Image (spheres, rainbow, N blue to C red):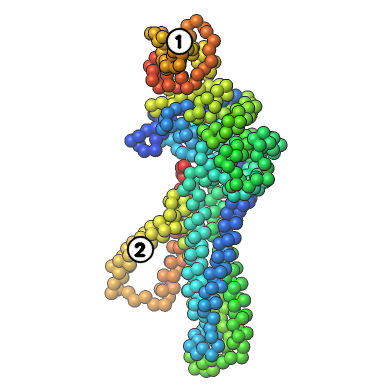
Amino acid sequence: MININNLNFGYSKHKPLFKNMSMRLSNGHIYGLLGKNGAGKSSLLKNLAGLVYAQSGTLDVMGFNPAKRQPALLEQICFIPEEFYLPSVKIDAYLKANAPFYKNFDHQYFATLLKEFDIPASNKLIEMSYGQKKKFIIAFGLATQAKLVIMDEPTNGLDIPSKAQFRKIMASAMTDERCIIISTHQVRDLDNLIDTVIMLDENDVALKASVEEITAKLTFKKVKEVDDSIFYAEPSLSGYNAVMPNYHHEESKLDMELLFNAILAEKIKFKPLFS
Amino acid sequence: MNNTFNINRFGLLLKRKWLDFGKIYLMSLVVLTVVIVSFYLFNIPIVKQSNLRWNDNEHAQLGFRLPTFLMVGFLFLTIEASTYFSALGQKPKAIMELMTPASTTEKFLCAILFTTIISLISYLFIFYIIDALFLNYINELWENQKAMNYNTNKLSVVSFSTLFDDLTEDRRNKFLFAFPFFFSSIFLLGSVYFNRFHYIKTALTATAFFAFVIFLAFKAAKWLMEGKYNAGAQEKDFVFVILFVASVIVTFIIWAITHIRLKEKEV
């Protein structure tokens, strides 16, 4: 679905954001894109959507170069930005103006999503709260039946019930033909939803591994004391939350926040496991 | 799927743009109408006014009309052009615009249609209607009144000239036909190029650039022609032809640059 080869990108020539980044993303997956502030999560998503241009390297999205912004590709991309704009029109008018651009737009599904998100269909977009607007664009984006769904901080501004609805809807929206990429800081919001973790750090991909692979190679557990076998540990009320190699094939639940901090702090220790 | 131009997609784009831009556009037409009507109301010629200007067809002229037509027209066309792509300067709006599944060519042609063709036609239409109604009114007001025509030194029945008379009075005016397209193209480019304060930045940049070009052209002409040549009427016409051709060519060049800038626009 997506091939990134030796991507070099930056907002100024002296401050590169990505240096020779290469990655391959396939359909049928929900990727969680993680990284510190300024690591380039949003910029990577914008590169994929053709909103910014790489300095060098190649980007192939479903056989297209996104920088060319060809309609055939644009109608297959659902991009939900962190900051968005909706015009001062009613939902009906918005649909009439925008839905016809997407030839697979599913009106029935859109109505179902609005119902699930509890958004009254007669509302004027400008009068909605930020959370409602966000749910509206998510519903519209998913109803386009786009094959590539890119979401930048989609759970920001959503209340607790809406986050649960969001997870449920995203899980049901996943098909074998679709590739979903979600960038977030709220890693707990995406627990149980993403199947592959991509972590950006120091101008490159620090980690790209499926949840299955991570839990097969690492174990996350609470320990009383820290020893040499532990890659990384954080103090908690009852001892330490630790990440360590999974030598004994133990089953554990991925703690994404812990993994994130562990990779940033002890990148060298993890490298041999995920090379 | 044709990724450069598709008539259905272009139609959808026009419809979408109208839903977004239409309300503001109609409001701007209302403002335009109020401005033109105000100019006319402040300039109604008083009956028995003796200092009327007459044209060659023995029609009394409305001196304020042509400057009003040109000035308001310039402002209307340039403001419309300058606001068209202004959304690209705001990140959330720019994302929505650029991610709309239509080609850059379609988006560009839509801009030309709205800012140049529709704006020009609606401006001419509104001005013509107001002028026709106004002429009807003042011709009734001046019915059977006579005034001295200083061109013929005779007392003539007062009948006011139309906008068309004013525009065609000097045959060289036709060479200025491309100017609305030219000015509109400059401000459309400015709306893509600048992220904020599009109008003022475009006006300043264009003024500085063209002042420099005109200064160079004058200097070059003076250096080449001084003392060697005295232009006659025919040569002056030739200069106007050059002005017309240059304005057409430069307009197309600016449109081409706008298309490229739109293609290269990043968020």
Q: Amino acid at mark 2?
A: Ala
Query: Which residue of the protein is positioned furthest toward the right in this rendering?
Result: A108
**Dots 1 and 2 on the same chain:** no
Residue drawn at (57%, 59%), measured in percent from left and top?
B25
Residue carrying label 1: A223
Is label 1 in a helix, a strand or a loop?
A: strand
Say if A55 sits above or below B202 in the image.
above
Mark 2 is surrounded, within 10 Å at the Cα level, by few (under 14), some (14 to 19) or many (20 or more) other residues, namely: few
Residue carrying label 2: B211
Residue drawn at (65%, 42%), measured in percent from left and top?
A99
Place of residue A129 in the rendered image (x, y in percent of width and height, measured from the top left): 58, 42
Place of residue A166 in the rendered image (x, y in percent of width and height, measured from the top left): 60, 30
Provide the chain ID for the residue under circle 2. Answer: B
Residue drawn at (61%, 31%), measured in percent from left and top?
A161
Say if B45 sits above or below A168 in the image.
below
Q: Quadrant of residue A251?
A: top right
Q: Amino acid at mark 1?
A: Val
Provide the chain ID for the residue under circle 1. Answer: A
Task: Assign the N terminus of chain A to one quadrant of the image.
Answer: top right
Task: Assign the C terminus of chain A to one quadrant of the image.
Answer: top left
